[in-house]
Image (spheres, rainbow, N blue to C red):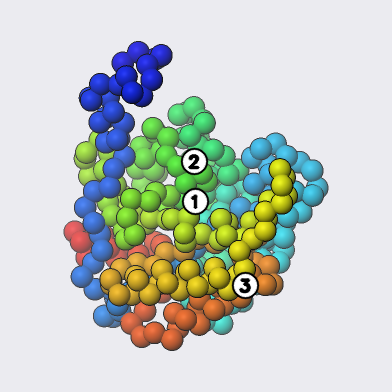
Amino acid sequence: MTADQQPWQWDERTWRAHVARVRAGRPLRPASWPGGARVAVALSFDADHETIPLRHGETGPGKLAQGEYGSRVGAPRVLRLLERFGVPASFFMPAVSALLHPEEVRSYVAAGHEVGMHGWIHESNTLLDPADERELALRAADTLEKLTGTRPVGIRTPAWEFSHHTLAITRELGLRYDSSLMADDDPYELLADGEPTGVVEIPVEWIRDDVPYLTIEHRGGLRWSTPPRQVAGVWCDEFDAALEEGGLFQLTMHPHVIGHRSRMVALRELLEHIDAHDGVWYATHAQVAAYVLEQCS
């Protein structure tokens, strides 16, 4: 293959190699969840805060204030609701976010939640040189370890995307799991060029994310967000299906998005719906990854 070839000009060996670079391997849905639970529920929050504008070089106070809201108001509000329902969660935090808000990081740890990797400054890892991607990942891991007292065991890439080098860096860091890809509803093992890696994928999906529903975009034409109670309905349906299948219900939210007063209704109604069912195992992403590895080894 030459550099100027278009995808339709690739030979079979070329397109198969691209597809096989990072692939879904064996399914890791266990026969049962701890204590005989019928479904696992793994809630997560990406505490991006100011790093969303900063990664684009936007330094105006307006955009930064929107991010600051996530730490100042959204995160405490989320923590109070999780405490009310007794639910553990995973907080994926860019290192710059953690350095800006060290007390927030410590509040997650004090409440028994997990803190996972989410890049350095919410950078687009697919645009980085391999050396830069690796250096930022190592720096981020060191930063979170210093602030939390524990080395992170999982990562969610800022762009929910892998470069050609992301999986190798993940393995070098000794991480137990990733939560960025979308090849299944339930956990699975990642393959690298067809070979098992031992890395668990806890898949995400835009259906199970607050941003597509609740972002109001005012540039290039105003787009209103979905009413929060409608969002709760979608998520409740996703949970019900996971319960019926005996699988995992994973959800991604952002304190600067879900943390607004009216939007917390969606999370509250979801938790009330889940709480009305027996056989639910609430777990962090790290706990899910450890359990499925143990049960499916």
Residue visible at 64% across and 40% down in the picture: 55
Residue visible at 29% across and 35% down in the picture: 19
Query: Regarding mark 3 in the picture, which secondary structure is present there?
Result: helix
Is disc 3 surrounded by few (<14), some (14 to 19) or many (20+) residues within 10 Å?
A: many
Q: State the separation of the CA atoms marked 3 and 1.
A: 24 Å
Q: What amino acid does circle 2 point to?
A: Ala
Determine which residue is flagged by label 2. Answer: 137
Residue visible at 56% across and 82% down in the picture: 84
Query: Regarding mark 1 in the picture, which secondary structure is present there?
Result: strand
Q: Quadrant of residue 203?
A: bottom left
Q: Position of residue 161 (x, y in %)?
A: 45, 42
Q: Position of residue 235 (x, y in %)?
A: 47, 69
Marks 2 and 1 close (CB-CB < 8 Å)? yes
Q: Earlier in the sequence, mark 3 or mark 1?
A: 1
Is disc 1 surrounded by few (<14), some (14 to 19) or many (20+) residues within 10 Å?
A: many
Q: What amino acid does circle 3 point to?
A: Met
Q: Is residue 190 left or right of residue 93?
A: left
On screen, 140 above or below 29?
above
Q: State the separation of the CA atoms marked 2 and 3.
A: 32 Å
Mark seen at residue 117: 1
On screen, 254 above or below 269?
above
Q: Position of residue 213 (x, y in %)?
A: 57, 60
Marks 2 and 3 close (CB-CB < 8 Å)? no
